[in-house]
Image (cartoon, helix red, strand yellow):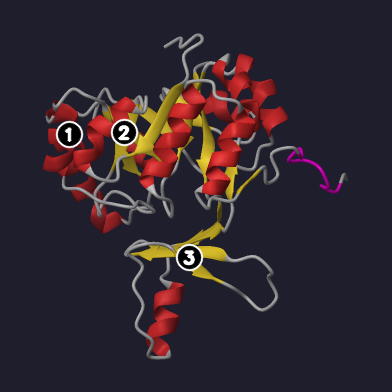
Amino acid sequence: MNLGEQMFVSVPLDKSEQLEEYQRHKVNIVMMSTRFLGTRMNNYYTIDEMIAVNGRNLLPVMVVINRFFYEPEMDELKAQLIQLYEGGIQRILCSDLGVLDLIQSLDLPFYVVLQTDTTMTSLQDINTMLSSGCHEVIAARELSEPELLTMVDHVKGMLGISFFGFPLMSSSRKQHVLNYFKEVDLPVSFDYPIEAIEQTRKDPFLIFEDDHGNAVFNGTVVSHLLNADAYRKANVVLYFDTLGLRTEDVLWCVRAVVDGMASSLILDEMASRGIAVSRGLLDDATVTGKVQS
């Protein structure tokens, strides 16, 4: 798939009735998941609901399978993958190599996107996975913008970029915070990320937990907005996350980026909407500061 000068964008679908709004804001693919298959989503759907949204033929659905699975869950995972394929779903985003292997063993011809969060840091990593049956690989969030742009022309397939959202700092398969609050007898709900502050940390951060574990996010949105034009000319897919953000704000940003609005104007608008956007470490090479042996 050669996108040429087209800006290609994927965004989680927060409410099924917003599908037309996503289309108007020039989103190309919507991401959806179930409580069994996914984590770190603003909203979850049933398999039938995802198939119904995909069947409307407004925007294709990519089903997110971004959690780890235990052996007793594999039969259910297999059954749901078959159900998704038979229902017309064609795109899967997965974070587990075991899921990728299962899809291949079932001979299900999905378009598979691999997002392992941290391990896709070199051309060797990315191209190895592309040659192993993935159609697209999302590069590690740790990579700087110069590192990403240097790789683009040498990737042997599609490259995904985590373009806009709260960056994941750590995750665990345990419900650490919920267990702590239960211990001290404080009620808490994680239907939405909660803001937390430590005495030793000046800036707040976000914590999200569900049945599949714990995730901690930086409290500032990190974005590649300042170099959007470079990505417009590259063969990449831009991923916008909505977790912890208002959907209307993210969709406004998507349309502004696709339409080529000046980055300074987009940043001003984001600030007026109360969203702190930063470059994070996008200007610093990942290898900077590593000890050379």
Indicate which disc, 1 or 2, sits on the residue closer to the N terminus. Answer: 2
Q: Which amino acid does label 2 sit on?
A: Val
Circles 1, 2 touching at the beta carbon (< 8 Å): yes
Q: What residue type is labelled 1?
A: Val
Q: Nearer the viewer, residue 282 or 89?
A: 282
Over which residues does the magenta segment extend? 284-291
Q: Where is residue 117 in the image (x, y as percent from the top left)?
A: 52, 44
Residue 79: quarter of image? top left
Looking at the picture, does residue 235 appear above or below residue 222?
above
Label 1, label 2: how many angstroms apart (C-alpha)?
A: 10 Å
Q: Which mark is residue 30?
A: 2
Q: Name the residue under label 1.
A: 53
Residue 145: quarter of image? top right
Looking at the picture, does residue 176 appear above or below residue 42?
below
Is residue 195 shown to the viewer in this render?
yes
Looking at the picture, does residue 137 appear above or below residue 142?
above
Q: Name the residue under label 3.
A: 207
Which residue is located at x 61 percent, y 20 percent? Answer: 229
Q: How crowded is mark 1: few (under 14 residues within 10 Å), some or many (20 or more)?
A: many
Label 3, label 1: how many angstroms apart (C-alpha)?
A: 30 Å
SS at badge 2: strand
Q: In the figure, is residue 183 to the left or right of 155?
A: left
Q: In the figure, is residue 122 to the left or right of 77?
A: right
